[in-house]
Image: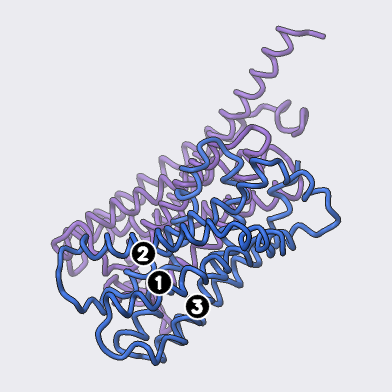
Chain colours: A blue, B purple
Amino acid sequence: MLKDLRLELRTRDTAVAMTLFVVIAMVILQFGFGTRETDLTRFAGGLLWVPLAFAAVLGVGRSYVAEREQRVLDGLLVAPVPRFVMLLARAVAIVGYLLAVQVVAVPLLGIFFVRGPYWGDIGWLFLACLLADIAIGILGTLVASMAVFTRARELVLPVIFLPLLVPVVIAAAGATHAVVGPNDMAQYRGYCLFLAGIAVTFGLVAYATFDAVFDD
Amino acid sequence: MTDGGSETRAPGRGIAAWAIASAVLMSVAIIGAFFVAPEQADGDIQNILYLHVPLANMSLAAFLVACVAGLLYLRRRDERYDEVVAVSVGLGLLFVVLTIISGSIWARGSWGTWWRWQDPRLVTYLIIGLIYAAFFVLRNSSEDSSRARFSAVFAVVGFASVPLSFYAVRRAQDFLHPTPIDSKGIHIDRGILLWLAVAQVAVAVVFVTLLKLELLQRRTDRALAKLRRLLEDPV
């Protein structure tokens, strides 16, 4: 588990590139809406989670590069460690990347787009981010473990990952909107519970199937 | 993969009976829907529900079959389960496309527009369609050695995401789609319900027929390839 985090701390390039990507995407989205309004609170969920979903694809894709290019995977597979632990380790690394990105992206959302009370509720936003990140990390690791070993992997990963990510994006964007828009905490709790449910569901599916992905 | 068993028996056994049953049941369902079933408030456009609802249900049943076959493949590594996964997902995807088309026609007739993002079920079927379309991208891009494994895993992951997609879309939107079945019971006229059930059985039989036919074709292709290899290299 520590290998990915150590490697990432040493290079930092994935997290930095993902952060830059999210900032660029948020700016492009602003112009894509074709508006010069300063208050885009009603679009806050989409403005945060569309860039984050695409950034997650980048991060998840990068997470297997060392294994594929330096042929480390064979060694990992014969190591006396349950494969589900491998999945968890990689998922933790992806959650780490995403949280690092969100440390920049979430405040930027408040500065760029939201007018009104925001900063007092930023902790709630980070909680929703964490739950969504766990679901993304587990699902992303499972999907990437197949996609990176296919032909045209750069194309295959987003095509198979993003549709599966739609419930996570809907729930995370809903939770974000509930906090920064109407400040409806009952709705926020509902979305957070749903995000937790998604994480548990994908966790169980990954537990049941991850062994088989590498079974040659 | 077994060399004996079903492949040495007459492989097409029963297909003709299933095909005849499909044709008869579909004819009965269409005649019943258009000429016997009670008329509905919205007029003729509502008759599309006798196609739309069974197709929608059957697509989910097809994905369930793929999920179960995927789990069985991961457990037993029998190539026949991989074929069931691929064929079921293909048929399920076909039914999803037909569900979206028929739903879109219904939306045009009832609400005056081909597509409404507020209709959670149609939107959910679009998401499910995209998920299972991606199945074929993964399957066709996989190496031969991993194709069956990846397909089986994706069939399981895809099916797990179906209820999540339904809930997510429903939660995020106002509910516009008619809800004939809810916690208080079934709010459908008995005559309509009867013909809906007939149409559902007809679509289910069509699914089984197509599944058996496609599996037969794949197994025949495989047997021919094996025979060709034997003829080219008898040793």
Measured in 3D between alpha carbons, the distance from the residue under mark 3 to the one under mark 1, in whole angstroms, is 23 Å
Secondary structure found at label 2: helix
- Check the residue under mark 1 and report the chain it is in: A
Residue A169 spot, x, y in % from top left: 42, 68
Mark 2, residue position: A23
The x and y percentages for residue B138 are 53, 42
Residue closest to the eye, B177 or A121 = A121
- The residue singled out by tag 1 in the image is A105
Q: Are dots 3 and 1 on a single chain? A: yes
Q: Please state if A178 lies on the left or on the right of B150 as rendered.
A: left
Instruction: Please give the label number shown on residue B39.
Output: none
Would you name the residue on which mark 3 appears?
A194
Instruction: Specify the subunit that label 3 lies on.
Output: A
Residue situated in front as seen by the camera: A216 or B230: A216
Tag 2 near tag 1, CB within 8 Å? yes
Q: Is residue A84 above or below residue B97?
A: below
Of the two numbered discs 2 and 3 on the same chain, state the one appearing first in sequence: 2
- Chain where mark 2 sits: A
Image quadrant for the C terminus of chain B?
Answer: top right
Q: Are marks 2 and 3 on the same chain?
A: yes
Q: Residue at x 42, y 58 (%)?
A: A54
